[in-house]
Image (tube, helix red, strand yellow):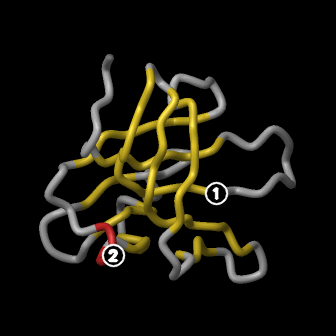
Amino acid sequence: MLIRNGEKVHVMYRTLHENGNRRHFLGEVMACEGALCRLEGYEFLYAPKKGVFVKKPERRATLMNLADSGYVVNLIDADIDLVSVDYHYEEGIGLVATDGEHFSLNINEFGAHG
């Protein structure tokens, strides 16, 4: 098994069409069987009128098959505090997930912005 309980992940859902909902999930693996995982964490939804991703405040549980081709999965450090992670735009980089201290993950869907 490649993923283990206690590991933390950042998951980007691939949209199937141009106007599809853009969503990401940041969470911890609570249980897994093969690539099917129960995750607990936070959902980020793209708000097209604002042009930004918005973090939903409530912690939620979800099931995902992390081997599914519809997801882009990044493993993140287990010591990251998920509550403190939010999205920000950084000059020369673009969209990043960061805790504002030590953790920063470039999550640009279309490459860095100049």
Q: Is residue 59 left or right of residue 93?
A: right
The residue labelled by disc 2 is 83
Q: Is residue 94 left or right of residue 78?
A: right
What residue would you read off at disc 1?
A: 23
Q: Residue shown at 18%/51% (left/top)?
A: 78
Residue occupying image coordinates x 64% and y 57%: 23
Q: Earlier in the sequence, mark 1 or mark 2?
A: 1
Where residue 101 sits in the image (x, y, percent)? 15, 74
Label 2: which secondary element? helix
| Numbered disc total | 2
Residue 84 lies, with reference to residue 19, above or below; the image says below
Q: Is residue 14 above or below residue 2?
A: below
Density class for disc 2 (Cα within 10 Å; few <14, some 14-19, many ≥20) is: some
Q: In this view, does 81 lie to the left or right of 44?
A: left
Rendered residue at 64%/67% (across/down): 45
Q: Where is residue 86 in the image (x, y as percent from the top left)?
A: 39, 74
Q: Which image quarter: residue 68?
A: top right
- Determine which quarter of the picture holds residue 6: top left
